[in-house]
Image: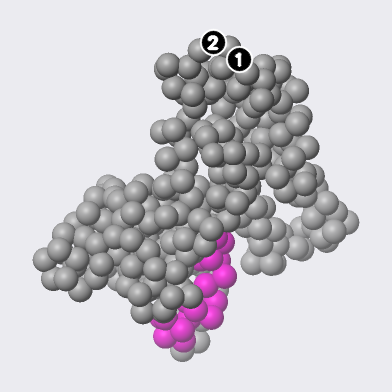
Amino acid sequence: MPLRLVRRLAVFLASVLVASVLVFWVGSALPGNVAQVVLGVQATPEAVARLEHDFGLDRPWPVRYLSWLGGLLHGDLGRSYLTGEPVLGQVIPRLGVTGWLVGLAMLLAVLLAVPTGMWAAVRRRHADGFAVSALSQVGLAVPGFWLGILATLLFAVRLGWLPANGYVPLSAGVGGWAAHLVLPVAALALVQASVLTRYVRSATIEVLKEDYYRTARAGGWRTVPALLRHGLRNISLPVVTVIGLQLSTLLAGAIIIESVFALPGLGRLLLDAVAQRDLMVVQGIVLLLVLAVLTINALVDLSYALLDPRLRAERRGRG
């Protein structure tokens, strides 16, 4: 296990390094002049050249990358080209909003998908099981932002039960915080729940065919207790894999949902920075998102050994 941790950590660090190179290189290769954008079209060539020198944009990109990488190692994401403020200072206040949105959406998706998928598998030859499976197929085709717009029209505009947009920090009151997150979390979670339901259903059907499940049923276990006692671990393996893969999709969906509901999260900051061509802010946020995805994937990979005893036995055999 320690050797596996060392190998996984080495792969993780190499992936982060490659990602940082790609993020910085792509940002630097984009056409246009950042200094010209900041100063405006009326700026003189001398002023543009002076600002490029101040930003360090007149240096080769490998030199700028190494300078940026050195700052990252000290927790410095650089300074905004537009405001001159530290990027980290702009990102930290937004992390909580996006974190709550993504975390609650994934939690809700899992809570919906696991029982629904297992039910659809057990009842696959009945009308209710077929209906659940069909609804999950429909959910796969529906964009989250469209669900968010429909939910806003119904629950905020027509019924007036929930606010249409905006955000209230948790420190200002649990009620206001929860009310502003219900619709965006639901819009983001329902699409992910549809995807997860399909995988849970498939994994459950495989468990239903296994001898150990049939033996448990022959021993007097009812369907649901037998699945929970003898099949839940096997069902969880593909589900955990999909959750890790879905995180990147969830983060991308959160960027759009934040715009639909005017949430002041990382997604809105990223879109604003792209529109204003504030590349240092864009690079910092994209790198943080990549780092989050790589971290989750590493944790998912390591969790296999805990969830699947066969992997532990295989490694002990190799040792």
Q: Nearer the viewer, residue 299 or 152?
A: 152
Q: Is residue 207 visible?
A: yes
Decide if residue 30 is on the left or right side of residue 73: left
Q: Which mark is residue 284?
A: none
Residue occupying image coordinates x 59% and y 44%: 85
| Dominant secondary-structure state across the stretch colored magenta | helix
Q: For the C terminus, which image quadrant?
A: bottom right
Check disc 1 and report its element: helix, strand or loop. Answer: helix
Task: Indicate the quadrant where residue 132 lies.
Answer: bottom left
Q: Which residue is mark 2?
A: 45
Which residue extends farthest left? 158
Expressed as whole percent of the image width and height from the top left, the position of residue 114 reads 42, 69
Q: Which mark is residue 49?
A: 1
Residue at the image position 41 percent from the left and 79 percent from the top: 174
Q: Amino acid at mark 1?
A: Ala
Kindly identify the residue that appears in the image at 52 percent across and 62 percent down: 96
Residue 150 position, x and y percent, is: 19, 57
Along the line of sight, which residue is nearer the eye, 310 or 110?
A: 110
Marks 1/2: CA–CA distance: 6 Å
* Viewer-proximal residue among 9 and 160: 160
**Tag count:** 2
Q: Which residues are magenta?
A: 221-240
Q: Position of residue 310 (x, y in %)?
A: 70, 63
> Secondary structure beneath disc 2?
helix
Q: Is residue 237 rendered magenta in the image? A: yes
Residue shown at 60% from the left, 32% from the top: 23
- Residue 60 colored in magenta in the image: no
Task: Mark 1 and mark 2 in contact? Answer it, CB < 8 Å.
Answer: yes
